[in-house]
């Protein structure tokens, strides 16, 4: 049953990219980030205020750590993601974004000095080779923002979002472990702070006075926002935490590479975006590469006691 829940979790989580495309038809990316994260943060912190008010007793060091988490994990990650999503298909965006485990392995080598064996280097090389065909393909609006003949600014933005997300997980792990803050408090407060920062940014660049929306425009925007908040921030974040009690973070990250396939199906159903066979092919190659990198860890998938998130 646990494996089924993991698959369902990523199938549900990948729908957020299609919902994001719908929301971006009615809102600029920075404002959308502010609205989504502020809403989610208010829901989570309101729950904590009613049930665990002592969670708000924070010192200066904890507040500083929460500020960094808000900037990297919420503000930068989501602004870059939504900006890139405007010009890329939902499937391609999800594909690039789900490469976080590869980025995490390389980041651990650079940041933590983690030992890289020849087997891991081979796996990483195969994984990055699997990325190239998707990165080299530019279609539609993406071509208008080409950085070179083989790379576009929207693609760079999504890669930046994935890297910021990985660093955010590192900060969250250190914050929860060393600063004695609960994951719910860290997530809720960082979403609220990051959302407010995005709103301030939006106020200066989005020209709010010209953002008057009709009822016909507000309704689909609110529907997409509420669904994104419910699916991603409320259901999937908490379900991921539950899954960590049974599976290793390595396995969950590996399973997350199935997300582009689910995103392709969701985009086909909700947006009419025809599935790209290249996404499926590249996903298969990346799965092989990541399997080589984490082969020793994947031999023991189910664990008896709660897992510690390893990046």
Image (cartoon, rainbow, N blue to C red):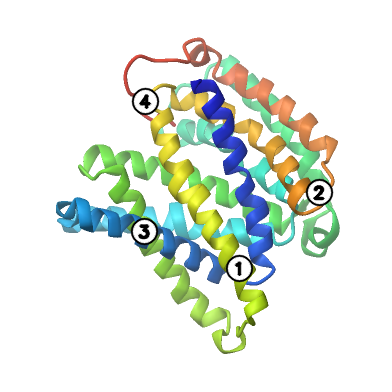
- Circles 1 and 4, Cβ within 8 Å, touching? The answer is no
**C-alpha span from label 2 to label 4:** 41 Å
- Mark closer to the chain start, 3 or 2: 3
Label 1, label 2: how far apart the Cα atoms are: 34 Å
Up the image or down, 248 lies above or below 13; here it is above
Q: In this orientation, does residue 260 appear?
A: yes
Name the residue beneath numbered marker 4.
245
Horizontal and vertical percent position of residue 269: 76, 47
3 or 1: tag closer to the N-terminus: 3
Q: For label 4, count other residues whose C-alpha is less than 10 Å away and answer few (under 14), some (14-19) or many (20+).
A: some
Viewer-nearest of discs 1 and 2? 1
Which residue matches tag 2? 150
The image shows residue 170 at horizontal and vertical percentages of 39, 40
Q: Residues within 10 Å of mark 1 (few under 14, many from 20)?
A: many
Q: Horizontal placement of 243 versus 174: left or right? A: right
Where's the C terminus, which quadrant?
top left
Q: CA distance from mark 3 to mark 2?
A: 42 Å
The residue singled out by tag 1 in the image is 221
Q: Identify the secondary structure beneath mark 2.
A: loop
* Callout 3 touching callout 4 (CB < 8 Å): no
Q: Which residue is mark 3?
A: 43
Q: Which circle's residue, 1 or 2, is located before the other in the chain?
A: 2
* Local secondary structure at mark 3: helix
What residue sits 49% from the left and 36% below the top? 107
For marks 3 and 4, give the one nearer the viewer. Answer: 3
Q: Is residue 103 left or right of residue 115?
A: right
């Amino acid at each position: 049953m646990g494996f089924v829940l993991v698959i369902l979790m990523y199938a549900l989580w990948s729908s957020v990219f299609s919902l994001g495309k719908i929301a971006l038809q009615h809102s600029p990316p920075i404002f959308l980030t502010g609205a989504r994260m502020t809403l989610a943060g208010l829901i989570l912190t309101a729950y904590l205020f009613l049930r665990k008010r002592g969670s708000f007793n924070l010192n200066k060091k904890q507040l500083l750590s929460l500020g960094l988490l808000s900037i990297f994990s919420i503000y930068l990650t989501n602004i870059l993601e939504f900006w890139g999503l405007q010009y890329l298909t939902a499937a391609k965006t999800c594909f690039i974004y789900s490469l976080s485990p590869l980025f995490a392995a390389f980041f651990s080598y650079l940041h933590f000095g983690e030992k890289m064996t020849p087997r891991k280097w081979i796996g990483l090389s195969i994984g990055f080779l699997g990325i190239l065909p998707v990165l080299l393909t530019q279609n539609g609006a993406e071509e208008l923002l080409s950085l070179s003949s083989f790379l576009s600014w929207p693609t760079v933005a999504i890669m930046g979002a994935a890297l910021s997300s990985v660093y955010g997980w590192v900060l969250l792990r250190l914050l929860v472990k060393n600063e004695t803050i609960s994951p719910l408090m860290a997530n809720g407060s960082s979403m609220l702070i990051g959302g407010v920062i995005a709103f301030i940014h939006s106020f200066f660049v989005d020209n709010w006075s010209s953002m008057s929306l009709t009822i016909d425009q507000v309704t689909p925007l609110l529907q997409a926002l509420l669904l994104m908040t419910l699916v991603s921030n409320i259901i999937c974040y908490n379900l991921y935490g539950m899954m960590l009690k049974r599976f290793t973070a390595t396995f969950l990250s590996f399973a997350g590479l199935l997300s582009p396939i689910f995103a392709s199906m969701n985009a086909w159903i909700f947006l009419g975006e025809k599935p790209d066979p290249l996404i499926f092919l590249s996903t298969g190659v990346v799965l092989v590469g990541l399997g080589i990198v984490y082969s020793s860890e994947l031999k023991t998938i189910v664990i008896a006691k709660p897992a510690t998130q390893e990046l």
